[in-house]
Amino acid sequence: MQPAPAEQSSLVRPYAVTGGRTAPRTQLALEALVSSATSAHHDLSTRTPEYQAISALCRQVRSVAEISAMLRIPLGVTRILVADMAAEGLVQLHQPQLDAGKPDLNLLERVLSGLRRL
């Protein structure tokens, strides 16, 4: 696994990575699943290290919260980067569907299962 971008350039402030933005352009749930829309041989060398790391990590479906934790990037920054990547077609988002404010039963079951494994 590659070192997290935050470890490579610890002097870069989060607002520099996001261009000063503090909110994503689209609403993005923390439990939203993200998958890479680029193939392993797709050239991302002109992209930022954060984009490259997110794209590589999301070759397996991951949640926004997982991406943040695994790359050690603040959650708000991760949400902005993932939303930007989705707008550019670099990742696909799979947002949870909430019916009239009711919690998603499948999500609650997955959380409960994960807590039991701890």
Image (cartoon, rainbow, N blue to C red):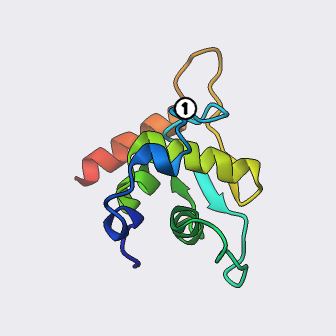
Left or right of 97 on screen, residue 23: left
Task: Using the rendered view, name the quadrant where residue 101 is placed.
Answer: top right
62 or 108, which lies in front? 62
Residue 103 image offset from top left, x and y in percent: 52, 24
Direction from residue 73 to residue 89 in the image, left or right: right
Q: Secondary structure at mark 1?
A: loop
Residue at point 51% right, 62% down? 50
Name of the residue lying farthest toward the top: 100
Residue 45 relative to residue 78: left or right: right
Give the tally of numbered discs.
1
Q: Nearer the viewer, residue 69 or 25?
A: 25
In the rendered image, which quarter contains the N terminus? bottom left
Pointer 1 residue:
23
Q: Residues within 10 Å of mark 1 (few under 14, many from 20)?
A: some
Q: In this view of the protein, can residue 114 be seen by the observer?
A: yes
Q: Quadrant of residue 97?
A: top right
What amino acid type is highlighted by mark number 1? Ala
Instruction: State the image quarter where residue 115 is shown.
Output: top left
Q: Nearer the viewer, residue 29 or 118?
A: 29
Is residue 32 visible to us here?
A: no
Q: Position of residue 66 (x, y in %)?
A: 42, 54
